[in-house]
Amino acid sequence: MRLISYTLVDNSPDPVTGVQLSPRDRLAHVVDQARWAEQLGFDAYGVGERHAQRFLSSSPPVLLSYVAARTERIRLLTTVTVLSLLDPVRVAEDYATLDQLSGGRLEIIIGKGNDPEQNALFGYDLDEQWERNREKYELLRRLLREERVTWSGRFRPDLVEATTQPRPLQQPGIPVWHGSASSTESTELAARFGEPLFSANGFHPMRTYAALIDHYRERFAAHGHDPADAVVGAGFIALVVAPRSQDARRAYEPAFRAFLDSPGARHNRLPFRTLEEFLEQGSALVGSPEEVLDKIGRYREAFGHELTGVPLEVPGCPSR
């Protein structure tokens, strides 16, 4: 089992004290956190991409390049690259550069994103986001693996014998995961290309994400790939551990209340209204060490995943 950590660089004020870090201090904290993850033996550290609200993660390749310079071993992830909003040519250039600078430590997780505000910021509505994500990935995959690419599509100008530079250090290309949160569109795309799936596993009960993972495995085999090659990762939305479970719950409760009122929870129609419901049915890892290990085991049994992702921070909870 590979173990990773990640951040969306949420810079919300502390829900108890109201204190908010400056952008400079918050970004510096991300770099320190990645170095700490490497020291703890994590396999990878990820930075997500968001372009709205309280998040400072609008440029993962820039931030991950600095992380690469301050670390030696840990692999680097994009969790996720919001490909539906971006130009695949620019994505190929940015991430091949990062792959070269990091010594081939990069893995990309792509996804469509599900935030209406960031879609609006780039001049898109939500109607064609799946089509954009699918078409742009088809092009990105070729640009990362091929030279002299000729291509035409709906969402950007045609290319004729185009070769992006630099080329990725890793060959035949940078490993790509497909982020999955709410639809079989992502699981189908991952299965079609025989590539790994990363379940966001954030806003809904376990059974919702288990169904998507089952669909991925079914379609993976249907596309003619060896079922043994279907690789799944699963994230968890929070990690708060204390010797006594009641202390962990008490520490997490203000963060949960703030989460209930967040745009993400409203947009994704969070089905949980109480902390008890959320801890029982959702993916937050909150409690004693024994409780947390038991919950990870229950998700492992349901998902059969090979990679587990946990955040090393929760907005509103003290970092350790």
Image (tube, grey):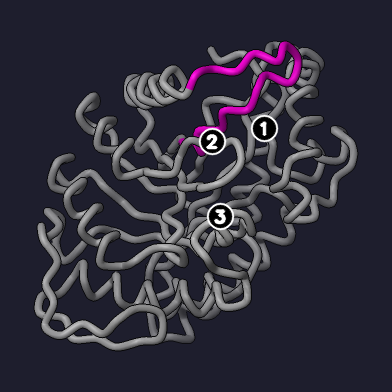
Q: Give the label, 3 or 1, closer to the camera.
A: 3
Q: Earlier in the sequence, mark 3 or mark 1?
A: 3
Q: Say which quadrant the N terminus sits in.
A: top left
Which element is circle 2 on? loop
Question: Where residue 219 sits in the image (x, y, percent)?
Answer: 52, 80
Q: What is the distance, in whole Å, between disc 2 and disc 3 at their CAs?
A: 25 Å
Which element is circle 3 on? helix
Question: Where residue 281 sits in the image (x, y, percent)?
Answer: 80, 45
Question: Where residue 70 sits in the image (x, y, percent)?
Answer: 23, 24
Q: Earlier in the sequence, mark 1 or mark 2?
A: 1
Circle 1 crowding by C-alpha within 10 Å: few under 14, some 14–19, many from 20: many
Q: What is the distance, in whole Å, between disc 1 and disc 2 at their CAs?
A: 9 Å
The residue indicated by pointer 1 is 285
Amino acid on which the number 3 mark rests in the picture: Gln
Question: Which stretch did the figure color magenta?
Answer: 6-22
Write the residue at 56% across / 25% down. 313
Do labels 1 and 2 touch, CB within 8 Å? yes
